[in-house]
Amino acid sequence: MHAGARLVGFVPTRDPKAARRFYEDVLGLPLLSEDGFALLFDCGGGAQLRVVSAPPFEPQPFTIAGWQVDDITAEVAALGARGVAFVRFMADHDEAGVWTSPGGSKVAWFRDPDGNLLSLSQG
C-alpha cells in the first residue's frame, strides 16, 4: 500500500439523521457528501470518515475511530459543553474524564448516537 494514500474510516449507523447531527454539529466535522447510503465527513489532513447506513448491529466494545488532538482538556470541555458524555473504563480518570496511560498519553472515550465508541487522544 502507498503510505501517502488518504485514510477513509468507516462507522456504521442505524439513524443517518442523528449521525449527521452528531458528526457535523457536535463534533464539527464538515460534511462532504450525502448519497442516501453514506455520509462523508472531512477529518482534516486528507482523512475522511464515512458513516454508512447499516443493518441492525451491535456496537463494538472497542474504539472504532479516534482523533489525535493537541489539547485534550480543551477538546473534552468543548464537547462536554455540546452534550457529549465521556465514558470511564478505569478508575484513574481525572475529573474531566481523561485517562493518562503509564506512558503519559491521554485518552478520553465517548459514544456516538449509535453507541459506537470513539476517542480523543493526546501524546
Image (cartoon, rainbow, N blue to C red):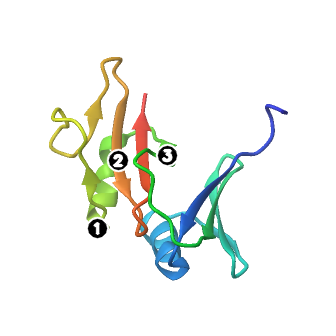
Q: Position of residue 93 (x, y in %)?
A: 20, 37
Query: In which quarter of the view is residue 122 placed?
Result: top left
How would you rate the neighbour count of disc 2 (Cα within 10 Å): few for under 14, some for 14-19, many for 20 or more?
many
In-front residue for pair 54/41 = 54
User: In the image, what residue type sits under mark 3?
Assistant: Gly
Q: Is residue 27 above or below residue 5?
A: below
Q: Which mark is residue 18?
A: none
Disc 3 designates what residue? 66
- From the viewer's perspective, is 41 left or right of 57? right
Looking at marks 2 and 1 on the same chain, the residue that comes earlier in the sequence is marked by 1
At 35% from the left edge and 47% from the top edge, which residue is drawn? 109
Q: Position of residue 77 (x, y in %)?
A: 28, 53
Report helix, strand or loop for mark 3. strand
Q: Is residue 88 above or below residue 83?
A: above
In-front residue for pair 26/17 = 17
In-front residue for pair 47/111 = 111
Looking at marks 3 and 2 on the same chain, the residue that comes earlier in the sequence is marked by 3
On-image quarter of the N terminus: top right
Query: In which quarter of the view is residue 16 placed?
Result: bottom right
How would you rate the neighbour count of disc 1 (Cα within 10 Å): few for under 14, some for 14-19, many for 20 or more?
few
Disc 1 designates what residue? 83
Query: Residue placed farthest to the top in the image?
Result: 103
- From the viewer's perspective, is 83 left or right of 19? left
On-image quarter of the C terminus: top left
Q: Marks 3 and 2: CB-CB under 8 Å?
A: no
Q: Position of residue 52 (x, y in %)?
A: 63, 68
How would you rate the neighbour count of disc 3 (Cα within 10 Å): few for under 14, some for 14-19, many for 20 or more?
some
Q: CA distance from mark 2 to mark 1?
A: 14 Å
Report helix, strand or loop for mark 1. loop
